[in-house]
Structure formats: structure tokens, C-alpha cells
Image: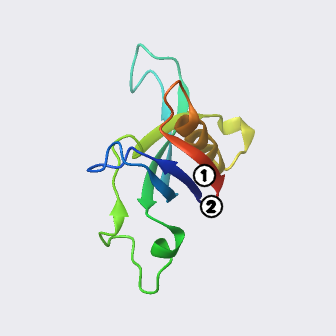
Amino acid sequence: MAITFNTDQIDGLIGTTINGVYARIQSVTVKKYDATTDPDVATHWMCLYDVVLHNSASTRNAAGEYPEWSNRLRSRAIDHMGCVYDPTSNANPYAQAYANLKARLAAGDSPIASSIADA
């Protein structure tokens, strides 16, 4: 799973639109919050995820590519995110994370990204 989009929120290039940014969710953690972690919060589950950005799918999938190489794009606005998770839904946490990522990128009066599509 991955998505592509256009954004002007790349660190070091704020205000310059980069087209066709390739994003993938590298890791998802499902975490339960209850009275033992925070007595002021009702029990709930969260899906926490990390987003990795590349300038294109071909850069991500290049021969010899390794996730630790420095050909990634960085964005503080598109990095570590989270959403509410329903453990009774039997939904794939990655699918929920991608749906949340797409919604968050397009949300608000000043969206972080445009032309969001599955890759």
C-alpha cells in the first residue's frame, strides 16, 4: 500500500510544490489507553503510524534501495500520526492508517496535500 500526492510542506522547500510525492506507512502500532496510562481518559485504542516520503515510486523501488538510505523527503507536517482504532472491527490497522492519512492530508481550509491517489 502507498499513496501519491502533491504538497508544499517538504522541509527545506516550504512553499515550493512537489508533485507526485510517494508516501508509504512504514510501521503501525496499535496501543490501548486506559486508567493505568492516564486516569483522566476513558479507555480507548489508537493506531499510531510513521509515514515515509520519497520523491517518487521509482526512487523508492530503485534497485538496491534500502529503507535507511537518505533519499527520503522530510516533512514535519507528514511524519508521525495517529487515529482512533476500533479493535472490534477486525479492520486491518494499515488500511485504517492509510484512510486516516488521506483524510488528514486533504482536511481543513488549507490542506497539506492535493491530488491524493492510491499508488
For residue 81, what is the image quadrant?
A: top left
Circle 1: residue type: Tyr
Helix, strand, or loop for circle 2?
loop
User: Residue 118 location in percent, x, y?
Assistant: 66, 56
The residue under the point 55% across, 52% down is 5
The residue under the point 40% across, 25% down is 36
Q: Residue furthest right?
A: 89
Q: Which residue lies furthest to the bottom in this view?
A: 63
In this rendering, which labeled residue sits more in front, label 2 or label 1? 2
Q: Can residue 43 be seen in this view?
A: yes
Q: How far apart are marks 2 and 1 (CA)?
A: 8 Å
User: Residue 75 location in percent, x, y?
Assistant: 35, 48
Residue beneath label 1, please? 94
The quadrant of the image that shows the C terminus is: bottom right
On screen, 94 above or below 48?
below
The residue under the point 53% across, 39% down is 105
Crowding at mark 1 (Cα within 10 Å: few <14, some 14-19, many 20+):
some
Q: Is residue 25 visible?
A: no
The residue under the point 55% across, 32% down is 45
For this rendering, which residue is in front, 47 or 87? 47
On screen, 51 above or below 84?
below
User: Residue 23 location in percent, x, y?
Assistant: 50, 57
For this rendering, which residue is in front, 78 or 82? 78
Residue beneath label 2, please? 1
For this rendering, which residue is in front, 79 or 48? 79
Circle 2: residue type: Met
For residue 99, what is the image quadrant?
A: top right
Whether residue 88 sits left or right of residue 10 in the image: it is: right
Whether residue 4 sits left or right of residue 17 in the image: it is: right
